Amino acid sequence: MIHKVGIIGSGTMGSGIAQVAATAGCAVKLYDANTEALDKAKTSLKKILNRLIEKGRIDEAEKSRIQSNIQYVSSLKDLSDSELTIEAIVENIEIKKKVFQELESYVSKKTIIASNTSSLSIASIASALKKPSRCIGIHFFNPAPLMKLVEVIPAIQTSDKVRRKTAENIKNWGKTVALAKDTPGFIVNRVARPFYGESLRIYEEGIADFATIDWAMKRLGGFRMGPFELMDFIGNDVNYVVTETVFEAFYYDPRYKPAFTQKRFAEAGYLGRKSGKGYYDYSEKASKPQP
Ligand code: NAI
């Protein structure tokens, strides 16, 4: 089984994946180009673990064990001894390719190099590597420690051994694996595009406001979160880029056309929970926490 895990990007997903791997007993190195993001990840893990203690799910010893399994590093080179690396940086193929090329120059020939991309082509990311057969998609859902499902996406270049080893390890981390084909948005994000897209269109056509649409989908549709709450949770920047990527990748099929509302929100920095404002206000000064 894989023991040494390197995570690239300590944002929403990278920090959650690090928690999952550390809880499973792996020695994790969490890297980010931005040291503030590393500090934030460390502080937020402490808060999450304290909350788990309050709820009686873990004890102090377990908290220390998980924390001591994660090392926060500020150089990509520090991941050189990883057996598996999972990248969770910005959803931009050129940046991901560049990072993968640099990473490959540090790690051993056996290291599996995976991406947590939501929508980009794994075949294209793999093509940047000297050994593309080691590349695979491992797509966690947000929040990674709570969401059971993980999509494992082999590219056409991925070896059977890498696919098997990856799927076995992710199962050992307590997750349920869905093998998905390397197609835009894989399974879940493809199904989710019309959910967000149609909600945004309903809003843009003046049929209902965000809160009413969320209320209807939760109360009447049985969803745990409404589409606008979910987009704020995911991050409007991340979600918009995924929609744009899927739209382009399906040769501009109008079914996946992004909405201007979401584009403007992303451009304005109204990213959702992580920026304090999105479709709802999450700032401390908001009179009543919403939603
Ligand atoms: P985020 O914006 O929360 O975090 C990204 C982190 O990557 C930041 O801390 C940033 O400093 C760092 N970073 C950016 N460029 C870097 C570079 N060149 N080298 C090192 N670090 C770099 O983003 P989030 O939401 O964690 O998404 C990351 C990836 O995971 C994306 O590919 C996204 O599509 C995917 N994803 C996101 C989900 C979500 O709900 N937010 C769900 C599943 C996948």
Image: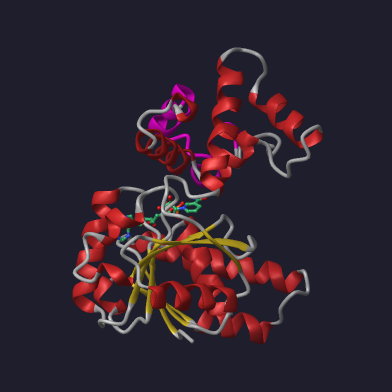
Q: Is residue 229 above or below residue 138?
A: above
Image coords of residue 63 (percent x, y): 62, 80
Q: Nearer the viewer, residue 202 or 8?
A: 202
Q: State the residue at coordinates (71%, 36%).
A: 288
Q: Is residue 77 left or right of residue 214?
A: left
Q: Nearer the viewer, residue 173 or 181?
A: 181
Q: Which residues are magenta?
A: 259-281
Q: State the residue at coordinates (57%, 45%).
A: 233
Q: Nearer the viewer, residue 89 or 272?
A: 89
Residue 261 sits inside the magenta stretch? yes
Q: Residue furthest right?
A: 219
Image coords of residue 111 (percent x, y): 32, 79
Image coords of residue 89 (percent x, y): 36, 56
Residue 25 sits inside the magenta stretch? no
Q: Residue furthest top?
A: 206
Q: State the residue at coordinates (69%, 26%).
A: 213
Quarter location, residue 161: bottom left
Q: Is residue 107 left or right of residue 233?
A: left
Quadrant field for ligand 1:
bottom left
Q: Is residue 175 among what the camera can see?
A: yes
Image coords of residue 280 (percent x, y): 60, 33
Q: State the residue at coordinates (42%, 34%).
A: 266
Q: Nearer the viewer, residue 214 or 223?
A: 223
Q: Is the C terminus in the top left, top right, bottom left or bottom right quadrant?
A: top right
